[in-house]
Amino acid sequence: MPDSSLPLAGIRVVEFTHMVMGPTCGLVLADLGAEVIKVEPIAGDSTRRLLGSGAGFFPLFNRNKKSIALDLQSPEGREAALRLVATADVVSENFKPGTMARLGLDYASLARLNERLVYVSHKGFLPGPYDHRTALDEVVQMMGGLAYMTGRPGDPLRAGASVNDIMGGMFGALGVMAALMQRAQTGRGQEVQSALFENNVFLVAQHMMQFAVTGQPAAPMPGRISAWGVYDVFTVRDGGQIFLAVVSDTQWAVFCEAFRFDDLRADLRLASNNDRVQARDWLIPMLRERLAGHTAAELGATFERHALPFAPIARPEELFEDPHLEATGGLAPLTLPDGRPARVPLLPLVLGGQRPGVRLSPPRLGEHTVELLEALAYTPAQIGELLARRRAVASDR
C-alpha cells in the first residue's frame, strides 16, 4: 500500500526501545503508516547481536523503521534526541523505571515542552507493589498462571512464543491510537502505559472467569476436561500427526458418515457432545485405533472435504512454504541488515482489500542518522562532530 493511503500516514513516532515489547508497538504503528524513528545507542539495539531463539527479533520487529544512533549519556546526544522528540507525535519507550527520567526524556519532562505529545511506556508491571521488579515474558507467564495452564500438571511450561512481549506491544499501540483519536478532539496528548504482567492476566482471564462461574479451578490444558468430545492430536500411519476436532452434534454425524462409523453414530452413549465428553476415556482410544491406518494427509483431505476442523502439526520454518500464505501475500520480501534476502510475515490485517506491507527493510545501525540530523537543521560541521564523537565512543567500548 502507498504510504499516503495508510491510516497513520503523517504521524511521527520516536522510539527508545529494545528487545521485543517496545519494538512491537513501533512495528504495528510503522506497518500502519507512521514514520517510526528508532533511537539506538552507539552499540545498537542488543537484539542485533542475539543468537539462538533471539536471532529473529531484530529483523522481525524493526522493519519499516529508520535508525539514528545517539549517545544519550552525552549532552550532545540528549540535545539531538530532544530536537527529534520536538518533531514527534508519539514517543515510545520500554526501559527500566527511572531511566527516561534520568535522561530528561520522561513524559513529565517532555509534556511540558509539547502538550500534544502521546507518550507510551512499556513495562513489566503497571504502577503498584510489583513495579520495582525486573520482568521478562517467562517471569510473568510463571507468576500469571499461563505457564501453569500450558504445561502438564506439575510441569509448568512457558508458551512457545513471546506472547506477552508481543501482545503488550500491541496493546501499547492500541493505546497510542486511542490517545491520538482523543487528541484530535481535545488537542492534548497523554501518557499510555502497557505492561507484561497485566497482559498475561488478560490472557488467562478466561480461566479466572471459569472459576468465578463454576467454582472449579481450571486444569492445565494437557490435563483439562475438554469441552468437546473429539478435540485431540492423533498419531497415525508412518508416525504422522494431525489435530482433529468434532465439536458439534452435526459435525459428529458428518464425521461418522465420512468414515462409515455407523455403529458410533447409532450408539446412544455418544448421542450428544456432552455424552461424548463423558465417554472420552474409551471413545478417544477407540478412535485412535480406528484412524491409525490412515496417513495424516488422508485424514486432512477427508476432514477438509467435509468441512470438519483439522490442522497439520506444522513447524515454524515450514510456514515459509504454506500455500495459503503464498497465495495471499502473507509473507513479504525484505533485506536483512547484513544484506541477505528474506521473507517476513505481515500484520494479520487487511485494510481496504490490501495487506500493509514492508516499505523499509530493518535498518542498519544509524542508517538514517545524517538524514535525520539534516532535517533537524544541524549543519554539516555539527553532524561531523556528532559522528566523530560517536565513533570515539564506539571505539572506547
Image (cartoon, rainbow, N blue to C red):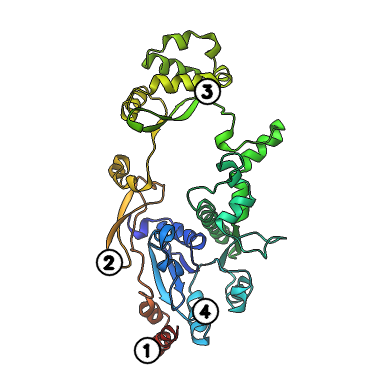
| Contact (Cβ within 8 Å) of mark 4 with mark 2 | no
Q: Residue at x 62, y 42 (%)?
A: 154
| In this view, the mark in front (3 or 4) | 3
- Label ID, residue 82: 4
Do callouts 3 and 2 mark residues in contact (Cβ within 8 Å)? no
Seen from the viewer's position, the closer of residues 231 and 175 is 231
Residue at x 43%, y 80% (from the top left corner): 376
> Which comes before the other along the chain, label 1 or label 4?
4
Q: Quadrant of residue 32?
A: bottom left
Task: Say which residue label 1 marks.
Answer: 384
Question: Could you tell me which secondary element the residue under label 1 belongs to?
Answer: helix
- For the residues labelled 3 and 2, the Cα–Cα distance comes to 51 Å
Count the numbered circles shown: 4
For residue 229, which numbered disc appears in the image? Answer: 3
For marks 3 and 4 on the same chain, the one whose residue lies earlier in the sequence: 4
Of the two numbered discs 1 and 4 in the rendering, the one whose residue sits closer to the viewer: 1
Q: Position of residue 346 (x, y in %)?
A: 37, 51
Sequence-wise first label, 3 or 2: 3
Give the number of the disc on residue 172. Answer: none
Query: Which residue, given by chain and number where applicable, does mark 2 sit on?
Result: 339
Kindly indicate whether the residue at mark 1 contacts the one at mark 2 (C-beta within 8 angstroms). Answer: no
Q: Is residue 184 left or right of residue 319?
A: right
The answer to whether marks 1 and 4 mark residues whose Cβ atoms lie closer than 8 Å is no
- For the residue marked with disc 2, what is the amino acid? Gly
Q: Tell me the element at label 3.
A: loop
Q: Hey, what amino acid is under mark 3?
A: Gly
Q: Quarter holding the C terminus?
A: bottom left
